[in-house]
Each structure stands twice: as structure tokens, then as C-alpha cells.
Image: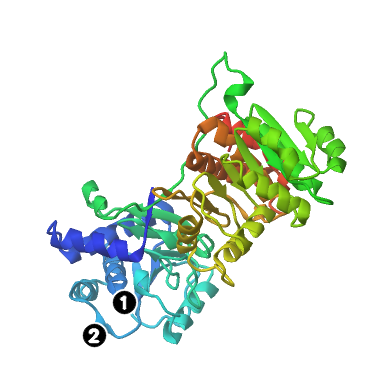
Amino acid sequence: MVLFTAAEIRVLDQALIKDYGIPGISLMKRAARACIDSIDQYFSDITRFVIFCGSGNNAGDGYLVAAMLADKGHSVEVVALGDQDKLTADARQALVFCQQSSAHFGHCEVIPEDCLIVDALLGIGVTGEVRSEYAKVIEQINESTADVLSVDLPSGLCADTGVILGTCVKATISVTFIGRKRGLYCNDGPDVTGKVRLSDLDAPAEIYKRVAEPVKILPRQSLPKRSRRGYKNQYGHVLLVGGNDGMAGAIILAAEAALRAGAGLVTVATRPENLIPLLTRCPEVMAHAVAGGEELATLLEKADSVVVGPGLGRNQWALELFAAVLSSGKPMVVDADALNMLAVAPRYYEHWILTPHSKEAARLLGVASVQDDRYKVATELRGRYGGVAVLKGLGSLVHGGEQFSLCPFGNPGMATAGMGDVLAGVIGSLIGQTGSLYEAACMGVVNHARAAEYLATQLGEVGLTASDLPLVIGRLLSGEEIS
């Protein structure tokens, strides 16, 4: 389960043709058969098809799909767009196959409701905004009530970034080839791809070694089963620092999450007025009121890991505490206001996990916005600041230098206050239990998102709150299967 850029897919495609002697038309036929297999699996009751083809290799796949469907006795209408003189030799050969079948070529002014639309318009080659000729057809497809199968990826979606390039087909299913494209899993991708099905076109496994360190898709994961003789000191002592005036909730959420994620000991350094609500909610926590950075010294010495930032604020009190944490040399999670302070005075450190959302990432990189190429942003964060960068959002990314992963779980219900505080507490807790910053970040992100997925089925996305998650996260980390 790995992700590739369009350029990497082209390298693999050319290697199959040149180094393994597989003709391009044979790869197109394999792609077309993969589409037919998905049609047979998901749309077996449909006998009427409208195939939209452009003028690139994606069109060649579409022409072959049309020919194969026609040969099975189905009603097939083909709509060809763009300059057909630009077709490659392989795509032109596919067009000839289609013309020799019983498929009908036309314009399809009105798309029948009982058909399946096959989108073979643009593929991975499009980079700029979709041209008007294609945009009109894409809007026509999206206005239809018919299901849509997109060949390789929905037309109008950037294969690398997942950004819609002006307009984009909204697919019911996307059948992608050779490898999964990065854009299918981030930004707008998950909203338009529908189900994603992969066909490797029978590519030999060794060919993928030609691409250095592709992005991996994180699987479900949990902690190892604990020994019956285990004791609390084996599972880490995490110190959480935050909760400035009026922001007690953030540090309470983080502390509860750290407890539920399995930390053996949890200490919180916060404002005096937060002690009662904190201990009322989490009596297991060792709570300390601190007036400044000097009072953190003993607490830092005892901790295995530190979480700094939830509800920290940016006043003098916050600055002193953040400075004390930075000078401790401990493994740490840097979140929320601590990230904003780090953006003002950047530094490099290999033993932290930074957990910014997009706006915080923009501040850390000194740019106005980072919405488009999230993979590039995560790479820049890791390169500039060291450690592990967790870029939160749809398709959260975890970059640890030599390892780079995407979380495929989560839902829009997570767009609510406190979710980041819970995640920070979970990851901080897992540092002491896994002994690895990268593993702690990956495991925390996955189970945080999976808990939200499960709870959305029970509570609805709209009503989901951050405080709902810790109990379920604990169950998932224990290896319990929840569906």
C-alpha cells in the first residue's frame, strides 16, 4: 500500500515497456480488463454504457473498455473529445479496435439515467486548469444521476496533489493502474474518487524498487499485548505542559487522552486555577501548578516524554515554559501555541514530533498558504525542523526523514475544537510505549482517526466531539476490532 507521483508512474510504465518488453497496447488491454472486472463486480446489472474519451493514453484505455463491453453485447456509445490526431500510436490502435466493434460513436446530448458512465478523458497527464471543451463535458457528467467509473483517476484531479484543476469528474469508483496516485488520498481526492481499486497490470514486484521511498499508506495498528507482570513505569511517564488562563479544556483533553492511550504515569504542569477541574475529570493525573519555567525542572527530569502546547497561550508564562521544555533535551510533542512560538524562532531538533494543521504549517514555513502540495509541505517541515512532522488534515501525513506515510482514515466530524489536543496527548503517551517517535506518531494518527470514524457511525459527524475519542482510542490500541 504505497503512493506514487505521476512522474514515478511514468518511470514504471516506461520500464515495463522498454525493459520488460511489454508492448504499450498490451498494458492498455490489461488496464481495460481491470475496468471490465470492476464493472462486472459493482455494476453487473447495467447493460448500457457511455464512454467519454479524450486524446491521451487514458483515451486508449477507454476505447478498449468500450470495445470489450460492445463485444459482450452491451449498448455502448463513445464520445470522443479533443484532437484525435494527437493520439499516441498505442491509443490510435485502441481506437481502431473500438471502431471495429459494435460500439457507436456520437455526441450524447443527454446521458441516460440507466447507463454507466466511463470517464477516460484526461488521466494523470493534466496539470493546468481543465480546458473549456472538457469542462463542459465534466459538468454534464456530474449533473447526471448515472454512476461513473473513472479510468486511472477522475478527470480534472491532479494526480500528485489531489487538487481539483478547475472542475473534476465525481466518480463512483476509480480504477487506478500500476500504483496508487498520491492525489487520490488527499485534498479534494477522497471527495471525488469514490471507491479506489488498484490493478498493478501484472507488473513484476521488483520493478517498484526503481522508485525510491514512495509514500506508504498506514494500516490499522495497535500496541503489543502487555505482559501480565507489567507495571506502570514500563509504559512511560509523560509530562503535559499547557492550559493558560481560560484554556483549561485543552490540557485536560490532552491529559485524558494520554491516560487512555496507555501511559503509565501522566503529569500535568498548568495554571493553579486548572487543578480542580483537571483532577475532577482525571483523578489519575499528577497535577502541578507552575508559575514559570524554573518550576518545570524537577518535572522534566522525571518525565520520559513531554507534550507542550495545548492551551499554552503566547504570554510570558507560556514563553518561559516553552523555553524550559526546549532546553530539556527530552523527546517531545510540539503542538498548538508551541508551534506558533516555534515559527517565530525556528530551530532544528531530531527528538520532537511537530503536529501542525495547514495554517500552523504555513506559519512554520513562512508562507501565506500550504493547501496545494501537502506532500511537499510535510517534506519541507521535516527538512527545516527535523524530527517527525505530522501534517494534520484530510490524509494526514507523517514524515520521519527516511519514512513517509499517509493516514487513510478519518472524517469531517473531526473538524471541531480539541481534536488536536487529543491527538497530541495520544502521541505523547505512545512515545514512552513504543520507544520510537515515528512509530508513536503513526500509531497515534491512525487510531485517533479510526476512533473518529467509528464514533461518527454512532453519534453522527455533526455531533462528534473531541472528548468522545479517548475511550475508543484505548480500545483500538488494545487491539480490539471496532467496526
Label 2 SS:
helix
Task: Look at the image and tell me whether residue 452 can be seen.
Answer: no
- Of badges 2 and 1, the one in the foreground is 2
Name the residue rendered at 22%, 47% in the picture.
206
In the foreground, 227 or 348: 348
Query: Is residue 329 placed above or below 11 in the rendered structure?
Result: above
Query: Is residue 384 placed above or below 259 in the rendered structure?
Result: below
In the foreground, 189 or 433: 433
Q: Point out residue 87 in the picture as x, y percentages from the top left corner.
A: 24, 79
Residue 179 placement: quadrant = bottom left
| Residue furthest to the top | 229
Determine whether, in the image, residue 386 is placed left or right of residue 461. left
Contact (CB < 8 A) between labels 2 and 1? Answer: no
Q: Point out the tag, 2 or 1, that comes first from the N-terminus.
A: 2
| Residue furthest to the front | 294
Q: How far apart are the two marked residues, 2 and 1, measured between alpha carbons? A: 20 Å
Q: Point out residue 479 in the picture as x, y percentages from the top left corner.
A: 54, 29
Label 1 SS:
strand
In the foreground, 399 or 461: 399
Q: Mark 1 points at which residue?
A: 104
Q: Name the residue under label 2.
A: 85
Name the residue rendered at 43%, 57% in the picture.
43
Determine whether, in the image, residue 444 is placed left or right of residue 457. left
Residue 444 placement: quadrant = top right
Q: Point out residue 71 in the picture as x, y percentages from the top left corner.
A: 26, 64
Query: Could you say which disc has been placed on residue 23 in the image?
Result: none
What amino acid is at disc 1? His
Q: Point out residue 429 in the picture as x, y percentages from the top left corner.
A: 61, 35
Query: Is residue 186 placed above or below 369 in the rendered structure?
Result: above
